Image (tube, rainbow, N blue to C red):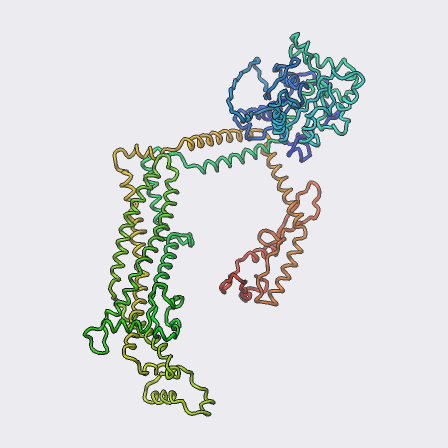
Amino acid sequence: MALEEVSPSAHSVNLSDLGDDNNSLFDFVDVEADPTTATHSTQMDQDINSNDYARQRRELLDLIIRLQAIGLGSELELPQIACIGSQSVGKSSLIESISGVALPRASGTCTRCPIECRLKRSEQAWEATVYLRFESGKSGYTGRTKETQFGLIANVADDRNIGDIELVKGLVTSYVSRPSCLILLTISCESDFENQGAGRLAREHDPQGLRTIGVLTKPDRIERGSERPWISMIKNETQSLRLRHGWFSVKQPSARQLEAGMSWSEARELDEKYFQDTAPWSTIEDEWRKQLGCSNLINHLGETLGKVILSRLPHICDEVDRLIALNASQLESIPPPPSLDPLAEVLQLVNSFTRDLTQHVQGDPRSGRPGLVQSLVMSAKAFQEDLRKITPVFQPTDKSDNAGSPDTPNFLPPGEEWPSKSEKGLTYWLNDVVELAEGARTRELPGEFPFAVTEELVMRTLHLWRQPVKDVFGRAERIFVRRLTALVEAHFGQYTHGGLRAVVQKIVLEKLEECKTVTVQELDFLLEMESLPFTLNSHYYLDYKEKFLKHYATFRNNRSALGRSLRAKPSPRREREETVADPLEAALENLRRAGFDNLNRQDLVKLLPADFSQQAALEIMASARAYYQVAYKRFSDTVPLAIDHRYVRGFEKAIQSTLVNGLKISASDAHDRCSKWMAEPQSIVRKRAELNDRKERLEAARMELMEVPGVVAMRERLSKMNCSSDRARLGSRNLSSTTQVAHAHTSSEQKVSSSPSSPVPEPISEAGPYGFAVEERAATPEPERETVLSLSPRDMMMGLRASAPVFSPSVSQKSNVTAVPAEPRLYTSHGRW
């Protein structure tokens, strides 16, 4: 059984009441059992509620009662007394003696329920309010409530209830394991201590006996001559059973006296008279008489519980502050309540949504690569790469020659990789183009070929652009829809219950479908525009035609002996003197004398005789390839621009008016519809109400606690003690860090000066969070002195330098680490980085 005796503030209790022991602020106040602190018999005879100190205790206990009344008993670890004991040891009788509440305690009767008693002084006549609570359950469900009286059971009458043993033990443990709970250990003198399991449970959770108060019941059941062990327990002489608060003994009425109708006051008188007249209790030394009788027990319980409450007040204040902060964060996590003007709020949501959408469409540099614009650019680059893969591949030799493929032209833009073999079947050999050209001739003069040949080669390629266009638009659509869905969820997701999110989502999807239709039409138009070759970019086209023609002709002529000779490097001067003069060099020299400067051997390739049809085929190849270079560059820009203009920006420009019209904001019933849309689910309403109610209760509790005199000073003292303890631990960890850091920095400076290209040394692991050491002035701090921590200015500067970013101008490689550049000379001799 557990007794919870509670009362409020102590107006004259200050920090000095806690003693010099710092542990009193963390655990329990040590109530010494010695003659100097003993309550005199004259005081014990008085009512415990009559003196000033008792009044101060009552105020502390009333404070705990008010905190429980606020509803924080289950959230805060409030001090209380848990009375525990085995079956039939007299727990109910003990509670009745303390509280005056009659409980069933006849022979063969068991209380059979946990009981919570809250004692509070009142100037009015005794009265009680009885609450009946009915609870329903289901099979397999174990109910829980707040229990403070526990009877440990060792046997059950039915195997079906054997689980009750562990259930009761678990209930007891849940209370006695709390550091703020005083354990009122009830032991019956009619059975050996070792046979009563409550003692083992109390020792398990309070091994040093700091918060256990022992009570011996039924002293009249001790057999004559067997009193010595029990007297030793009262005197706290038994080492294994010694408790800080000692052992008490009380005498309760017998069953016959109860049947005779003995009153509570008569039972108290009987208890006092028993210990005065009955040996060996009547002959015990005076210093231990304060451990006998219910009055002394009640007085000690009130005094101890009051001091426990006082010592726990700073921790309760901290816990209340923590719960207030937690409650505030939970309130922030739920949507705010609907405003009184739902129409204005819906308009505000629409405006906020469109502003965010515009920011995404315009581009946000802070979003990085996952941003909307950045993602669309990456998709456009993939589209450009797809177009390059469709490039027609021209081989300036006959297929039967097995002459291989020409090298990649060195005049193409860097970074552009062009296929040497077409995966789309667009590889054309020289004999294929000759055959196509010869077959297309009609009435042309000799040496002329119709433009239709070049057009045919170009159109065969451009017809394959439709699939890359579909792919790039599909990627853009997925990127935009994904981002748009996230924005709709962020702005309207909390209004799912009222249906606003669904309405907005429907309007958005319909508008997206309209924009998609317009965009597809625009892309089809762009594809249709490319159905006929055309360009005014003459310089770009003619330049590439000339370069490709030279590239193809050079590769073609390399096959002949003369061509190889023209491409061969000139012999060194020494070898030319020993051999016959090179006729090609002689020809080039004669041309230079005739005024044809800057000619080389490769320029003479153009003078080689060639088959007329093959030469025309090479020109057709160069024309088709040059035009593709022009057209692909143009098309790779216009398609992404069309998608951005028609689909992305087109949607962004129209969505605000579309939402306003689709939601019918200007209609006569708009207010009612907006109210319905903004309606919250009942779960959110209940949660907000619960959190607001909890906020009021916690703030009320903080006000109650702050009104206790001295509680602010106690919290400040506790905070200083915690800071001092943390500093001491930090100082012991970094006791020799100054010497280590100084040595490490000296070594690193030497390394840097001797090897400028060596990497920057790693930060010292023993240094502080910014690389500097924490210096302790005293290796072993004196008692009652705080450990003083200081930062050396040199260490602080070195730490700041160690945390500076390092930039390397070389490209980082995954396989190795690039060298760091030498230390710049712009720093002073003392400014090592």
Does residue 11 show up? no
| Residue 277 in the image: above or below residue 359 | above
* Left or right placement of residue 799 versus residue 467 in this view: right
The residue located at (51%, 24%) in the rendering is 138
Does residue 406 show up? yes
| Residue 766 in the image: above or below residue 662 | below
The extreme front residue here reads 400
The residue located at (35%, 34%) in the rendering is 498
Rendering coords of residue 701 (x, y %)? 53, 29
Q: In which quarter of the image is residue 602?
A: bottom left
Rendering coords of residue 303 (x, y %)? 66, 24
The residue located at (57%, 26%) in the rendering is 64
Rendering coords of residue 730 (x, y %)? 64, 47
| Residue 381 in the image: above or below residue 482 | below
In the picture, the quarter occupied by the C terminus is bottom right
520 and 404: which one is in front?
404
Q: Quadrant of residue 43?
A: top right
